Structure formats: C-alpha cells, structure tokens
Amino acid sequence: MARIAVGGFQHETNSFAAVKADFTQFETADGWPGLSRGAALEPALAGINLPAAGFIDAAIAAGHTVAPLLWCSASPSAPVTNDAFERITTMLAADLRAAGPVDAVYLDLHGAMVTESIPDGEGEILARIRAVVGPDLPMVASLDLHANVTRRMVDLADILVPYRTYPHVDMAETGARAAALLDRMLAGWRPGKAFRQAEFLISLVAQCTLAAPARDLYALLADLEHRHGVSLGFSMGFPAADFADCGPSLVGYGADAAALAAATDELTAAIAAAEPDFVPVLLPPDAAVAEARRLAANARRPVVLADTQDNPGGGAESDGVVLLDALIRGDAQGAVLGVLADAATAAAAHAAGPGAVLDRGIGAGSAYGGQQPLQGRWTVEALGDGRFTGTGPFYGGNRMQLGPMALLRHPDGVRVVVSSRKQQAADQAMFRHLGVEPSAQKILALKSSVHFRADFGPIAEAVLVVEAPGPNLADPAAQPFTRLRDGVRLRPLGPVFRRG
C-alpha cells in the first residue's frame, strides 16, 4: 500500500472585490478550519464536508497511509497577497520535503486563485509541488465546481477532479473520487488527458445544479463516463477572476483515446447548446420585498430572498445594507436578514447586553458603492459567541468560529443576524445559534447566491434572487475585465471581450 502526501490551499478570487486575502485570513478559523499543519491536519478536518477529509477517509479505507502536510483556506475576496502566497506555498513545499519518501501527492485546491502577481495561482502551486517530487510521481488534485482551469494545471497534475454539485454538497465525496482515481494510478493506470474551454462566462446564480441546464449537463457527464469508460470533470468557472482562462472548462481522462475524444466531444457540444439557458432571473430590492410580502401573506413556509451580490462566498464583504433598508421601508415585519458582518456592532451589542437599545448605524463597513451604515435604534434580542456546528448538507459537521454574534431588532419589526467574521448564510445553524428558527419565519433574507439552497431550499415557499449592490456581480458583463482572452462572451450570448 502507498504513502500519500495530503495538502490543501484554497482561495476563490474576485478580482473586483476590495479586501485582499492576507496570511491572517488563512491562519484564522471562520466557517472553515484555520491553517493546520502536520499532525493537526487530520483532526482539524475530521467529519467536515471538505475534499481533503473525504480523500483521507477513502485513502485510509483503501489501505494507504497519509502523510499530512498543510491545509488552509480563506474566505473569497480580492487577490491573495504575495506575502500570503509565498509563505503558504513555501510551508507546503517544506512540509513535503520533510515528510520523506511518498508514493503520490493529493492536493485540495479551489482552482480560481489569483494573487497580486500570479494570475494562475493553482498552476503555480502545482508547479512548485511538481518541482519537489519530480515529473513522474502521481499527483491528483480536487477542484471546486467554480474552478477556472488552465492548460498549465492540466499539464502539471495527472488528474483534476472537480465537484459536481452547486450547492457543493459533494465536496467530501469529490475527495473520495480523487482517492479512487489515484488508487488506480498507483496500480498502474496512466490515462490520457483532454481539456476544453467554453467561450462564455456563466453567472454564479445560473450555475445551480438543482435545476436545468446545469442539472442536465452533469447527468449527461455521468452517463458519458459510464458509456465510454472515462473520467470527466466539468467546471463552470468563477466569473469574477480577471485573467485569460476565466470561464467554464472540461477535463477528461481515459486510456482509450477514441473513447475519451467521443465523450469530451459530446459533452462539449452539450455545453455549447445549453448556453442560451444559463440566464438568471433577478429582482431589484424593492420589487423583491414587495413580491416576498405578497407571497408570504398566504404562505405556510418562509419566502427566501437571496442577496447574491453581497455574498461573501463570492468575494463580497457581507456588510451591504440596501436589502435590509428595503425590508424596513417595505414594512416586511417579522423578516430576518443574515448574516451581516459587522464586528464593531457585534461588540457593542455584547457590551450593552440583551434588551439594550443601540442607537447607531450598522453594516456598510466596506462602503461598497458609497453605502453608509444603516441608522436605527436596534434592540439587542440575543447574543452568541459564534461557536457552533453546521448542521446542513453544505456546512454539516463544520465547527464554525464567526466571533461574537448578535440578533438585533429594528423598531419596524425587521431583525438582523450580525457576526464578527463574514460567512455566507448557507446553514440554518447560523440562525438557531441566536434562537431564530428559520422554518418559523415569514421572510428570510440570506447573503448567499446558491449554497443556501441545500439547507434552506427544502423549507422555502419560494426563492427570489435579489440584485442589491455588491461586488459579486450577477452579470459578469458588468465587470471591468481587462485580462480575459479575446473572443470570450461576457455572458451567455452576450458581448464579446476584446483586449484594448
């Protein structure tokens, strides 16, 4: 049985966001564990829906041993600082050298990392690890469904294994699939490779695999794998990374070149044919609140508003107040919004105590689009330390550390969940931590694009996607790209990018 080195370095980069990811953000635990090295890595990830956790469990079950290196992630944001990237990749390579002889390497990567100086972060990580282990040692990496895959990544890794669900309920499962493919390589399988890129960008809101067209494309992918005896991966891309290879891509692996070509040709054609269907339905804040009130009047379950452009899972700061203001002005009494990242307000609530009234502005710390804190007299209804365990399909098992949290109520009856660290509202435990039962609410406003659907979709009467201000733009064509490759359509059937 083999000895496999395991490491991970994850970041999803929004080139147009305001706050960069420095080393502290990778070091600090938030919705995911903080930077963990060596013997601390396995217990830090145990029981969590993460690729590295799934890989470790599957590899050990197959009889292999694991040499833990380093694992870390930071919340999506503006590019990773050069300092953070160099420190972490240096540690990762050093840990690999210190681990002694290994038979293979597995890396838990995102696939959409951009640094201050390097547009293809994962390509550089793979190059540095390949420089340590040489050209022949098997190296497999798992990727996020939103990966922007490059030719360099495909060339350096023996196999890339992207997620297949959005919401990403299959992260641990993807790690297990990567372990199974690596196990085949260790037994002598050396597959050929295929790589294709689509010529249009897809809004995150339109990438949900619970509905067409993404649902049907992944069903076809699984069918093609079965029919042709190949392994396929389809990444829909992260459309806020300003570099040449941004966008959807397809990877394939198989020993039979003809079968691999047939499978990749058919899936490539299906992706192209689905282009017109990747169009999201969006509502401005006031219209969304009015429609939510109308639906909630006769609903037996919550109406959910997705504040997609202020989604911290897409690089926003989760501090926008435009939708919150619309709820208050629209008389959406009983509505609850979460999670608003505002450490100063959370600290003030803890200092004042339950029942106190805070006469202050909240949110808008990043001042995106000229936003100012929303003034009001906020009653402190509940307090929490921000330490709880996720219970939903996406965050399930994760030991969250969001810092001091508070539930505040506006005089007009709208409540807001405030945290000290940003994390998208994709788990009901975030609300229950402060005594709010999500299923009992009339209207829930969530700072998330799609991940919330895994846990909140089953309890929702309806879901409305709101186009309130934020840097996680729902329309990629609205972003000021400068570095894409020529010919890419900035949205399905949309304008074409030309340099200069």
Image (cartoon, rainbow, N blue to C red):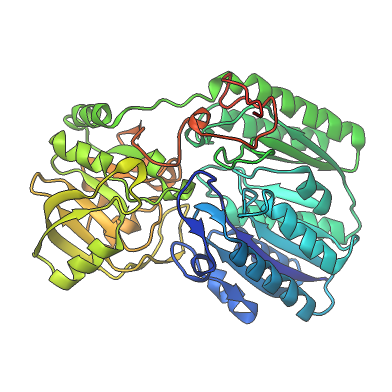
User: In this rendering, would 339 be left or right of 172?
Assistant: left
User: In this rendering, would 310 be left or right of 340?
Assistant: right
Tell me: residue 262, above or below residue 381.
above
Residue for point 54% across, 68% down: 23
For the N terminus, the quadrant is bottom right
- Can see residue 177? no
- Can see residue 120? yes
Residue 101 screen position, x and y as percent: 85, 77
Tell me: residue 411, above or below residue 34.
above
What is the quadrant of residue 491 in the picture? top right
User: In this rendering, would 455 be left or right of 210?
Assistant: left
Q: Nearer the viewer, residue 449 or 477?
A: 477
Residue 262 screen position, x and y as percent: 83, 28
Q: Nearer the viewer, residue 371 or 392?
A: 371
Residue 36 screen position, x and y as percent: 58, 74
User: In this rendering, would 114 be left or right of 265?
Assistant: left
Residue for point 79% across, 33% down: 227
Residue for point 78% across, 54% down: 181
For the C terminus, the quadrant is top right
Tell me: residue 245, above or below residue 358.
above
Residue 194 screen position, x and y as percent: 82, 38
Q: Exactly how many numbered labels are in the figure?
A: 0
